[in-house]
Amino acid sequence: MSLAAMEVAWFLPFALTAFIRMQPEQVALPALLLRSGAWSPLVFFALCWGTLLAYLLSTDLLNRHGVDSPRRELIMIGLIIVTFFLTARLFLFPTRNLWDLRWLNAVLGAIFDQGPGSAAVFFLLLLNVFLWLRVAMTTDRSLTFFSVGVSFRLGLLLALVGNALFILAAGQPVQQALLYLWLFFGFGLLAVALARVDEKAFQATQSSGGALPWPRFAQLVAMTATTVGVAIYMSTLYTPTVLRMILGWFAPLWQLLGALALRLFSVLFFFLTPLLEWLSELIRALLANLEPVEVGEQSYGEVDLPPSQVDFAQMLRDYALVRYALIALVLLIIFAVIALLVARTRDRALAVEAEESHADGLAFGSNPFQRLRDLAGLFRRYGLRPGLLAAISVQNIYANVSRLAARQGYARGTAQPPDEYLPALRRAFPGHEAALTRLTTLYMRVHYGDQPIDADELATLRQDYTALHETANTRTQPQRVS
């Protein structure tokens, strides 16, 4: 969610600049967009962010239902078209009756005939295309600390360029551009911090791999907000008045440095004057020996467009069917590309989910609804006793060990019982048979029964996990170096 908000923050200045520059007829359609000048930038941000999250959720639900190709691609194209018309209905015709379909004719006329309100319609079309493209890219993105950091650095450059265009090309106030910039920094820093915490929770040997607790998450949000708040406050001090005041404190120093620089340049030019005079005389002598260059008369004729260009443009104006077919073909190609980008990673994502769906347990980043169900089940069995935290720790350790084994080619199958998965774990970690047997036994006690885990068993299990983690790192170290 933080990464999606970061991308919306750098994209909105570009989108709003394009909309302001491409809409000469603001009175063409009664629309919410016509009253958008009085909106706060936070309203645009919240709308685009919520829309992007809704698109991500719909794509995730589609992938989880296991729809096969090519029906999946057709559904994706249908979703893109439906969401575009839905946003056009809500933003451009908010006061129309629910059963009044005249707005559909107006939208199609704006697209194919460039009729009234075409700028607003094309703006919403481009906005939806971008959001679906970001959904497709997010589906194929690794949310590691390195990849999130690269996205943050690239987004920072785009945010600077976009806000500069928002001020210079669109003529918008500096305060609005700064608000988008602060939103980018806030959510960007939060996304980078969460990616780092997730990476350390899995790689650190002393970590149980549990989810980031809500109090810790609140502390992280507070620290990010404090950092951005301090930056905002410091930016208010960076004004011409404050700078002149600070520079005025050093006025005697500037006067002394100016006097020293004047005397230094005077001495320097005293020694360089003979050389400069000699160069001046040499250049004059060279120019005196040059003969003037004769320039002939030039005539400029009329520039005619090639007949093919004239004929094609005239054909588009005269034949509406050709124009409609061409525009529909371009839109269909764009929608198909987005659908293919979303669908190309589905098989791989389903394979990963099949390998890790049961092994993930309560790990950070798992399905939140499944996580809540697991927590509710543990709470029913253990209540608020100390055994609840021990049971959560056992499930987290088992999930991390399963992921370590999956990285070595011994993934756990869908709904595979832990005792049947134990031989694969032993092949993944030879020499740790006793520790793996102990881990499997304790996990089955927690996951299938209500037998509590005491402190000694949990301490032994954590020592076993540390040894398994070090073994996995030792095996993968040569691959990382290469």
Image (cartoon, rainbow, N blue to C red):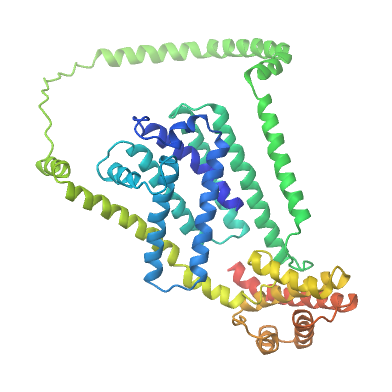
Residue displayed at 67% across by 77% down: 402
Image coordinates for residue 224, horizontal then vertical, percent: 70, 44
User: In the rendered view, does 326 fall on the left or right side of 54?
Assistant: left
Q: Considering depth in this image, is 127 or 431 the residue closer to the camera? A: 127
The reply to whether residue 393 is in sight is: no
Q: Considering depth in this image, is 57 or 91 the residue closer to the camera? A: 91
User: In the rendered view, does 381 fall on the left or right side of 126?
Assistant: right
Q: Considering depth in this image, is 404 or 370 the residue closer to the camera? A: 370
Image coordinates for residue 373, horizontal then vertical, percent: 70, 70
Q: Is residue 137 above or below residue 461?
A: above
The reply to whether residue 74 is in sight is: yes
Quarter of the figure that contains the C terminus? bottom right
Q: Considering depth in this image, is 328 or 174 the residue closer to the camera? A: 328
User: In the rendered view, does 106 fall on the left or right side of 415?
Assistant: left
Image coordinates for residue 441, horizontal then vertical, percent: 78, 85
Q: Is residue 265 above or below residue 160?
A: above
